[in-house]
Image (spheres, rainbow, N blue to C red):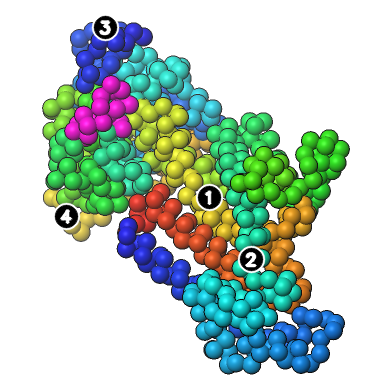
């Protein structure tokens, strides 16, 4: 198991290295001058040139990359216009926001985490629960209702569901405040009430896939020989379904869940925009629009870290669930 | 059912059982019919089968795929989905009627009084749990007061009894760490962990190579001698039947076509289908160049069984009695020797003569 873990983490680090190189090449080697977009007005050539110098754009690409990486791991000195000393993990300075990129990230990352993690818990419980119920009650009205629910979820768009939720619960019934972000550490109730609509909207859309996947998996597992063996032993239905069938059926769901959560943590642009909450996703989109390279670089890297981490986690869960994986 | 709280732990809680008279068979199946409703129509998987097995005796059920042999055994254990299956007739295990009983009643007997050894030991074991845990689970479900350690000791003991070396170490291994033969031993250990009175083995040696097959059959015979259990051996392998069975039931298209002692059915078979089975098995002692004679045609569809004798489209002798084979379902009737039954329209004289002339010199029938 330890060997498996080490191998897996090593390959994750390699992946992250590759992603960082590629992102760097893509954004810093683009033909477009990254500086020209930074100040649309009142920028004389001298100032632009100074910014180029400060960003290190006149240095060779390798030097630039080395400098960026050094900043992440040990911190580095940026020019006085960029806030001077930048401690590790240094993600650079944003001329657009006029602050260290790390500060921006530190502000918006908790928002995205607060949206995605509770929503993921909700959509997994709802999706897998619905899937199990409809598999075990196959052909009944419960099954049809669950399938109908998941079909609806799969065919709707988030901005539509979000708008309907906002209209009903915020503007008509006035049960909930206008969505906003409050730190869970400051006021958990406000945190939840400000984000609950986003959770519900995400859970509704995502649970559809999970309901259908886990229903299909459960039905397939129920026809497996080892489930028949479990029944032949005289185990109660609850044990047969819960201990024997569920564990085998859940494995593919874990994969999809890991990838979905990893991707969602990289930013939920549409959700954040629909509910007017500033998270990682919106920050990334705005950075792209403003040509704010250090921020773009940071958001892409962070998304990549989440996806890679989610993959490692999925593999570890797999190994925990299926003993045959541990051999590899 | 009363379950006295003071029952000593380690002893299975046996519910009150109707007194079984001495000499009664442990399992009695009468006129069993199993039908599945499918999208394509009603499948009559078993259509009026009767047999009985006493403790310490072995019944071999023989037939091709789709003959209803596995369906019969699953019906005895009550493992069919009640929503899609209609079961009529009688199944009596140790004096208890099972047909029509709520699943919870049958569940308590399952694994304790009657157990099953499945065909493919790899798919029959859960890939995610250690073999020891799976065996201990089978023990604890029927011995709820037994501690984990006690259950483990019992499971290790069973692993040793079925001939698995180092059972204490093997307990903590997963099915994929076992060879095919060892896996089948695990499945057998699991089936025997509660000392069942009735053991149904569904082609237990099909997935194994011949030497391992012999070991497993010996093991079953030893365990039967020890536990005095009734065994049903489901197989399409007549060699296996001749080794282990006392009695044989030959099934075709969901019906019994021949039934008798091993000696009767294998030495003096009366049904053309049984002849076909025997002629298609090679003999070690025969002429190596002699051709085997396969049964022509394919097993029938259970949704659309041929009218009359279900075997008539494949029977070389179906034309010998006018239209009877096509029009009339032959009943299982005494075929001369006591206890020997056959369902065939051919006259007894015809059968004796045809067997002697056409069959007796082919394959293992020699």
Callouts 3 and 2 on one subunit? no
Q: Which residue is mark 4?
A: B287
Q: Which residues are magenta?
A: B137-155
Mark 4 to mark 3: distance in Å?
54 Å
Q: Nearer the viewer, residue A235 or A262?
A: A262
Mark 2 to mark 1: distance in Å?
36 Å
Mark 4 to mark 2: distance in Å?
90 Å
Q: Earlier in the sequence, mark 2 or mark 1?
A: 2
Q: Residues within 10 Å of mark 4 (few under 14, many from 20)?
A: few
- Residue A163's x, y, as percent? 81, 48
Callouts 4 and 3 on one subunit? yes
Residue A31: within the magenta?
Answer: no
Q: Chain of mark 4?
A: B
Q: Which residue is mark 3?
A: B19
Helix, strand or loop at label 3? It is loop
Q: Which residue is mark 2?
A: A103
- Residue A43's x, y, as percent? 81, 86
């Amino acid at each position: 198991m330890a060997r498996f873990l080490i191998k897996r983490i090593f390959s994750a680090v390699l992946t992250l290295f590759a992603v960082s190189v590629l992102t760097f090449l893509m954004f810093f080697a683009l033909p477009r001058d990254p500086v020209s977009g930074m100040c649309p007005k009142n920028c004389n050539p001298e100032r632009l040139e100074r910014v180029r110098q400060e960003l290190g754009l006149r240095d060779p690409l390798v030097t630039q990359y080395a400098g960026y990486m050094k900043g992440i791991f040990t911190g580095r000195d940026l020019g006085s216009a960029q806030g001077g000393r930048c401690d590790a993990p240094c993600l650079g300075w944003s001329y657009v926001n006029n602050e260290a990129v790390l500060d921006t990230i530190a502000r918006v990352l908790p928002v995205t985490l607060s949206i995605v993690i509770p929503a993921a818990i909700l959509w997994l419980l709802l999706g897998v629960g619905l899937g199990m119920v409809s598999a075990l009650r196959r052909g009944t009205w419960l099954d049809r209702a669950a399938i109908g629910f998941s079909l609806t979820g799969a065919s709707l768009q988030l901005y539509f569901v979000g708008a309907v939720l906002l209209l009903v619960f915020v503007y008509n019934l006035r049960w909930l405040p206008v969505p906003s972000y409050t730190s869970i550490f400051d006021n958990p109730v406000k945190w939840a009430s400000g984000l609950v609509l986003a959770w519900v909207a995400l859970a509704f859309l995502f649970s559809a896939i999970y309901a259908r996947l886990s229903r299909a998996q459960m039905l397939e597992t129920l026809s497996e020989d080892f489930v028949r063996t479990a029944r032949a032993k005289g185990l109660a239905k609850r044990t047969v379904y819960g201990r024997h069938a569920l564990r085998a059926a859940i494995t593919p769901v874990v994969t999809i869940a890991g990838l979905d959560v990893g991707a969602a943590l990289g930013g939920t642009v549409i959700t954040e925009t629909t509910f007017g909450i500033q998270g990682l996703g919106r920050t990334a989109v705005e950075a792209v629009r403003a040509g704010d390279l250090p921020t773009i670089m940071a958001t892409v890297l962070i998304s990549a870290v989440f996806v890679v981490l989610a993959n490692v986690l999925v593999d570890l869960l797999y190994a925990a669930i299926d003993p045959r994986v541990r051999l590899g | 059912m009363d379950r006295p709280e003071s029952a000593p732990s380690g002893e299975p809680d046996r519910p009150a059982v109707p007194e079984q008279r001495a000499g009664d068979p442990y399992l009695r199946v009468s006129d069993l019919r199993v039908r599945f409703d499918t999208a394509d129509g009603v499948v009559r998987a078993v259509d009026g089968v009767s047999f009985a097995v006493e403790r310490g005796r072995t019944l071999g059920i023989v037939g091709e795929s789709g003959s209803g042999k596995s369906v019969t055994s699953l019906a005895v254990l009550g493992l069919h989905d009640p929503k899609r299956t209609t079961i009529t007739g009688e199944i009596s295990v140790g004096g208890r009627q099972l047909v029509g009983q709520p699943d919870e009643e049958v569940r308590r007997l399952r694994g304790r009084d009657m157990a099953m050894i499945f065909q493919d030991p790899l798919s029959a074991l859960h890939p995610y749990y250690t073999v020891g845990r799976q065996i201990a689970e089978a023990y604890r479900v029927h011995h709820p007061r037994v501690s984990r350690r006690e259950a483990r000791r019992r499971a290790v003991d069973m692993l040793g009894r079925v001939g698995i070396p180092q059972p204490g170490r093997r307990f903590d291994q997963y099915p994929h760490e076992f060879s095919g033969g060892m896996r089948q031993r695990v499945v057998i250990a699991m089936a025997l962990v509660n000392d069942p009175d009735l053991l149904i083995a569904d082609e237990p040696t099909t997935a194994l190579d011949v030497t391992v097959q012999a070991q497993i059959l010996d093991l079953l015979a030893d365990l039967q001698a020890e536990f005095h259990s009734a065994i049903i051996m489901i197989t399409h392998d007549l060699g296996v039947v001749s080794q282990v069975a006392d009695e044989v039931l030959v099934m075709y298209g969901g019906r019994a076509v021949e039934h008798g002692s091993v000696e009767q059915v294998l030495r003096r078979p009366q049904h053309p289908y049984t002849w076909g089975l025997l002629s298609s098995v090679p003999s070690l002692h025969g002429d190596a160049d002699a051709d085997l004679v396969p049964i022509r045609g394919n097993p029938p569809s259970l949704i659309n069984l041929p009218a009359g004798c279900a075997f008539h489209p494949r029977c070389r002798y179906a034309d010998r009695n006018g239209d009877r084979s096509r029009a009339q379902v032959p009943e299982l009737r005494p075929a001369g020797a006591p206890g020997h039954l056959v369902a065939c329209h051919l006259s007894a004289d015809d059968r004796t003569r045809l067997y002697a002339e056409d069959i007796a010199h082919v394959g293992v029938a020699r």
